[in-house]
Amino acid sequence: MKVAFRTDEGVITAVDGIDFDVHRGRTLGIVGESGSGKSVSVKTIMQLLPDTAMVNEESSIIFQRRNGHIVDIATLDPKSEIIREIRGDEIAMVFQEPMASFSPVYTIGNQIIEAVREHRDIGKSEARVLAIGMLKRVGISNPEVRVDQYPFELSGGMRQRAMIALALSTEPSLLIADEPTTALDVTIQAQILDLMRHLKNEFAMAIIFITHDLGVIAQIADEVAVMYLGRIAERGTTREIIRTPQHPYTQGLLKAIPRLDQLDQRLTPVEGDIPSPLARPRGCLFHTRCPQRIIGVCDQRAPGVTEVSPTHSVSCFLYEPEPAT
């Protein structure tokens, strides 16, 4: 997948040739700093990109529908009937700030009912019963009352739960969660993560979970893809990424996580700032910030993908095999 944007300053490459898959009953975590291309990647799957976006013609997004048919979402017109059928029904998305997704002038129940009836041939009363049941399943107390309340009448945690209820009301095959816990306190965050794990198993759906926090990823994901400036730097099982990180960027992200057993130790941030996408570095994209860079190598060409194990790969010259002589 390759995605770029036309701007007044020039063409910006946001996603530069990433490749991943996710299956039912599994959670793929995508982690990286702001500007890594995480959100653009999933908005491409949802066909929610602005008109200034340019998706490479060779890009493909293969999705198996409920009826068993295979479609390439990348080839669909964003305004076509088929993508409208898929979006919100078979693929649903939970955003970081639910107030940006809920209309403030309609009740929570009305918005869930509308979503259900858009994709299901059922009456309004039946859809209301379904909405109340879904609010109850995501742990909202007094769902019979909450269903008639407006978004501003709910707390942040409740709004996020209601957003998840809205996304799951059509029982999607794939749920995309774009930093859904960032604005919540740690107690509510833990509850939301537990809820998503439970619902994933209940609905046997696939989840793509986006965050900048590897600590959150460790709690929710089965596999992890670490993104940097539009590319995947490292990918593996959560255990492999957390316990044996290979890429210097992944190692830096892990060192920046606070530890309760080392409260007197200063945090170690990743040096420098992520470069502007208008001035992408030559060679390895991370070499300008990498403490282990190899002068004359990392700044000259991009590394290939090296398999550390059958389930663990990394793009870094430190792990490339020596050329045969």
Image (cartoon, rainbow, N blue to C red):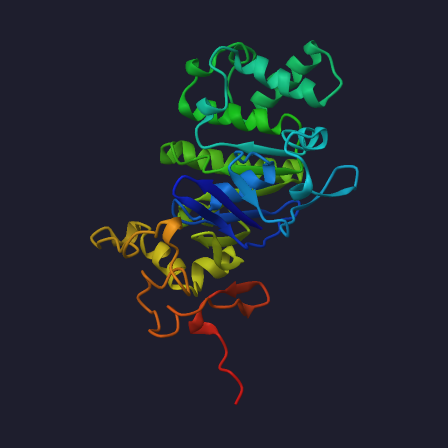
Where, by quadrant of the figure, is residue 68 drawn? top right
Q: Do we see residue 172 in this rendering?
A: yes
Q: Who's the residue at 44% across and 47% down the image? A: 12
Q: Measured from the top left, where is residue 137 in percent x and y?
A: 58, 26
Q: Measured from the top left, where is residue 202 in percent x and y?
A: 64, 36
Q: Do we see residue 139 in this rendering?
A: no
Q: Who's the residue at 48% across and 42% down the image? A: 5
Q: Measured from the top left, where is residue 61 in percent x and y?
A: 65, 46
Q: Who's the residue at 73% across and 39% down the image? A: 65
Residue at the extreme bottom: 325
Where, by quadrant of the figure, is residue 83 drawn? top right
Q: Nearer the viewer, residue 189 or 280?
A: 280
Q: Nearer the viewer, residue 135 or 58?
A: 58
Q: Nearer the viewer, residue 290 or 23?
A: 290
Q: Is residue 69 left or right of residue 211?
A: right
Q: Nearer the viewer, residue 155 or 249?
A: 249
Q: Is residue 96 above or below residue 281?
A: above
Q: Who's the residue at 50% across and 16% down the image? A: 103
